[in-house]
Every structure is written in structure tokens, then in C-alpha cells.
Image: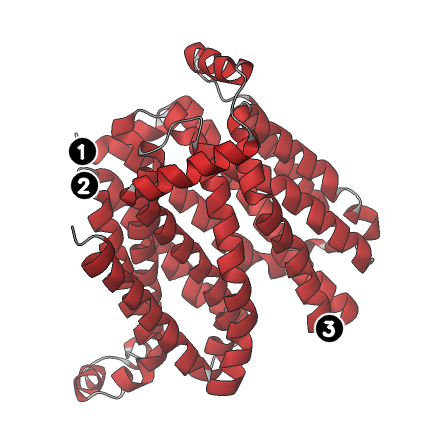
């Protein structure tokens, strides 16, 4: 029965181990990133020094993304998951003792990021190997919730964990979590026929790197659903970086709340919305057109972002004031409540983009090409987010946070309109 789809998917033991490995790995990686931003700023008291961490982390994405995808497609992806988590654990160890040295932090960040480029094209492409096609959408729903929840949890908890444990102990915790992720990756069981099939591909004299890249772009250009899904996933992930950058300014100038409170009031409802979206997709909409679901997600996402800066105007409307008149003070609708609702909708809409688009990528590719697709996706996110992340803060200072968020919402709606009326017209 449809209502049991997510439960049935979680009962697939190898997939459950993959999910547990993903959670510990993603949480470790993201808390590592957020902690380093705090630590470097505390050492140098310089935004330029913090930018150095961002560059050290994003540069390998641009350089190694596609190359890593090509290589991972030639290797056993389970072994790649184990090795990358284990090696990242070892890579963090120098920070136990040298966390006050900025050059060491840059080098470790760069090294961890290089290893992560190999981890990414091995992780999500494992799903179709472990899960039957009919459970793919549900599997991606679960995977998406765990991934975004781990990112948001790391974002929200990085500050409190640093205060509670201290810098050295935080890096010890990160190392332990990477090792736990490696353990769960090591116990994933893959059917022997899949291992033998992979070995046969490895044993053959395969195409050169350039031929594989040409084949990849040929596949994308010939398969419209694949190119659309790839583009939609890129947009969804770039938006996360942009919102993370603009979030503190939005909290201070529009919501009038402390920056530290923003993760609680924005991230928590967003994760709840994402979870509900995943449940709806995984249990009830798994037979619907994934392309149509993605377009719905983009439209709703665009409108929700567009409305974010205008909560004060809605709060001042007569019908809202009329409702507030009959409500006790602590329940009265204000700009913060409106933002919480919009954050929930943003999370819900993100699920409609991320989950069907990931499923399309997995359905339209083979195990021999999936790593390259996700390697390309990783590179695209790195390249396309680099300039917006650098520009959005400066733009907000010049033209205001409200104008920047409005512009982001309009751009997402334009992308949705292009998908609906131009690229998918036929």
C-alpha cells in the first residue's frame, strides 16, 4: 500500500546503513565548515581570512568535481564511501593540536574538500544500486530529509557545540563522526551480481577521460529530462548558499531579531516543511510526473522567497489586524510568524525540486555514468554559487536586503517560467 512506501524503503537494510552513513558524514562535514568560519574569524578578526576558508573549500569543487565523477564510476562506490570518510577523519587530526594556525586550517580545509569531491559522486548514486526502481522516489525523499536536516542541524548547533566543548574537542567529535560514517559504509552489502558487473566494466579497456566527458555531455544534451533535472538541482543547492549568506542581514534589518536566533526561527520550520514534502512525495505522489513535480516546486519556491521581505506589509493589513484583535497577545500574527510560515513553505517546495530531480538523474543513468553526473552537478554548484555568494552580501549593503531577496525570488520564478513555457513546451 502507498502509505507504507517510506517504511518499506527503510526496511531495506543496506539502504538504512547508507542513510546512517550519510547523516554522520554530512553532519561532520557541515559542522566542520561552520566551525572553521567561527574559529578563523576569532583568530584573525578579518572577513578576508574567513573568505580564505570558503575559497579553500570551494576551489576543489570547481577543479576536481567532474574528474572525481569519472574516477568514481570506475571504482567500487561502497569502498569510495568508506575510504573518503576514513581519510577525512585522519585529515582533521592535525587540528586537534594546530587549530590556532590559519595556514594549517586552510591546508586541512583544502584536503578535506578534495576528498569530499570523491565522496559526493559515490553517495547518492548508491541509492539505485540498493533500492528497487519502484522505491526510488521514497528513497530519495528519505535521503533528502536526512541530508538537509544534517546541514541545518550543523548550521544551528555549530555555535553552541563550540561553546560547550571547546575548539579542540569539537575537532575530536568531528573525527569520531567521520569514523562512524565510515563504519556504516563498510557494512553496506551489495549483491554479488552488481559487484561482478562492476568488475567486468573495470577490467575492460574503457574510454579515455575526454571520451567519457564527451559521452556525458552527449547524454545530457540528448536527454531533456536529465538536463532539466540537473539544472533544477543546481538552482536548489545554489539557493541554500545564497540564503545562508543573506540570512543574518535579513534577521537584523527586516525581522529585527538576533542573528543567532535566525537558524531556530528559519531553519527549524524549513526542515519541518521539507520533511512533510518528503512524506507527501514518498507516500502519495510517487506515480506522478517527476518533471511536473519539479516545476511545481520551483514556482512555489519562487513565490515564497519573493514574499519573505514583505511580512511587515501583510502584518499591517486590515484583515490581519482584525484577526489579531480577537487573539491573545502571544498568539497575535506578526512578521516573525509570517516568516516562519514562509520558511516552512520554502522547505516544502525544496522537497518538490530536490527529490523528483534526484530520482530522474538516477532513473535516466546507469551505474557506469551516475558518478560523472553527480560530479558535474557538484562542479556546477561550485561554479554557479561562487559569484552569487560573493556578490549577494555586497549587493545587500548597497541596495538593501529586501531588494536582493525580491530579486532572488523573481529569478527563481523566471527560471520556473522558462521550464514551463519554453524548455518543456513540446
Q: Give the CA distance from mark 3 to mark 1.
A: 53 Å
Residue 256 seen: yes
The quadrant holding residue 307 is bottom left
Q: Is residue 43 left or right of residue 162?
A: right
Q: Which residue is mark 1?
A: 2
Up/down of 59 relative to 312, above or below: above
Up/down of 214 relative to 304, above or below: above
Residue 21 seen: no
Query: Which residue is at a point 46% across and 77% down the rendered structure image?
Result: 250
Q: Marks 1 and 2: in contact by CB < 8 Å?
A: yes
Q: Which residue is mark 3?
A: 46
The picture places residue 197, in percent across and down from the top left corner, at 44, 14
Q: Is residue 130 left or right of residue 101?
A: left
The picture places residue 360, in percent across and down from the top left corner, at 31, 39
Query: Which residue is at a point 37% across and 59% down the rendered structure image?
Result: 270
- Mark 3 or 1 closer to N-term? 1
Q: Residues within 10 Å of mark 2 (few under 14, many from 20)?
A: some
Q: Nearer the viewer, mark 3 or mark 2?
A: 3
Q: Residues within 10 Å of mark 3 (few under 14, many from 20)?
A: few
Q: Residues within 10 Å of mark 1 (few under 14, many from 20)?
A: few
Q: Which residue is mark 2?
A: 284
- Which residue is at the front of the view, 236 or 226? 226
Q: Give the CA distance from mark 3 to mark 2.
A: 50 Å
- Mark 2 or 1 closer to N-term? 1
Q: Is residue 26 left or right of residue 413?
A: right
Q: Give the CA distance from mark 2 to mark 1.
A: 6 Å
Up/down of 48 relative to 355, above or below: below
Amino acid at each position: 500500500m502507498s502509505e507504507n512506501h517510506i517504511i518499506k524503503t527503510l526496511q531495506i537494510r543496506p539502504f538504512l546503513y547508507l542513510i546512517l552513513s550519510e547523516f554522520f558524514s554530512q553532519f561532520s562535514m557541515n559542522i566542520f565548515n561552520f566551525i572553521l568560519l567561527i574559529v578563523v574569524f576569532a583568530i584573525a578578526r578579518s572577513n578576508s581570512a574567513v573568505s580564505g576558508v570558503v575559497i579553500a573549500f570551494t576551489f576543489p569543487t570547481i577543479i576536481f568535481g567532474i574528474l572525481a565523477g569519472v574516477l568514481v564510476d570506475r571504482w567500487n562506490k561502497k569502498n569510495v564511501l568508506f575510504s573518503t570518510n576514513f581519510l577525512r577523519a585522519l585529515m582533521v587530526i592535525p587540528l586537534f593540536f594546530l587549530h590556532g594556525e590559519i595556514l594549517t586550517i586552510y591546508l586541512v580545509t583544502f584536503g578535506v574538500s578534495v576528498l569530499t569531491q570523491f565522496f559526493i559522486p559515490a553517495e547518492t548514486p548508491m541509492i539505485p544500486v540498493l533500492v528497487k526502481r519502484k522505491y526510488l522516489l521514497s528513497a530519495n525523499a528519505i535521503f533528502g530529509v536526512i541530508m538537509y536536516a544534517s546541514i541545518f542541524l550543523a548550521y544551528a548547533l555549530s555555535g553552541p557545540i563550540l561553546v560547550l566543548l571547546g575548539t579542540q574537542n569539537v575537532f575530536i567529535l568531528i573525527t569520531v563522526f567521520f569514523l562512524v560514517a565510515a563504519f556504516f559504509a563498510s557494512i553496506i552489502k551489495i549483491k554479488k551480481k552488481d559487484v561482478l558487473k562492476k568488475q567486468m566494466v573495470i577490467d575492460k579497456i574503457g574510454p579515455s577521460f575526454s571520451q567519457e566527458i564527451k559521452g556525458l555531455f552527449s547524454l545530457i544534451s540528448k536527454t531533456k529530462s536529465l538536463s532539466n533535472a540537473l539544472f533544477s538541482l543546481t538552482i536548489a543547492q545554489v539557493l541554500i548558499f545564497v540564503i545562508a549568506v543573506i540570512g543574518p542581514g535579513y534577521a537584523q534589518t527586516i525581522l529585527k531579531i538576533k542573528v543567532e536566533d535566525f537558524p531556530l526561527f528559519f531553519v527549524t520550520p524549513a526542515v519541518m516543511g521539507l520533511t512533510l514534502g518528503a512524506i507527501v512525495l514518498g507516500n502519495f505522489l510517487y506515480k506522478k510526473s517527476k518533471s511536473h513535480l519539479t516545476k511545481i516546486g520551483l514556482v512555489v519556491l519562487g513565490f515564497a522567497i519573493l514574499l519573505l521581505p514583505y511580512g511587515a506589509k501583510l502584518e499591517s493589513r486590515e484583515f490581519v489586524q482584525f484577526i489579531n484583535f480577537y487573539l491573545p497577545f502571544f498568539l497575535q500574527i506578526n512578521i516573525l510568524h509570517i516568516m516562519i510560515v514562509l520558511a516552512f513553505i520554502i522547505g516544502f517546495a525544496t522537497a518538490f525540486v530536490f527529490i523528483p530531480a534526484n530520482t530522474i538523474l538516477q532513473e535516466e543513468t546507469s551505474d557506469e555514468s551516475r558518478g560523472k553526473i553527480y560530479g558535474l552537478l557538484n562542479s556546477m554548484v561550485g561554479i554557479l554559487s561562487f559569484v552569487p555568494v560573493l556578490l549577494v552580501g555586497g549587493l545587500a549593503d548597497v541596495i538593501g536586503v529586501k531588494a536582493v531577496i525580491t530579486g532572488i525570488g523573481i529569478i527563481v520564478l523566471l527560471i520556473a517560467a522558462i521550464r514551463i513555457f519554453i524548455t518543456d513546451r513540446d
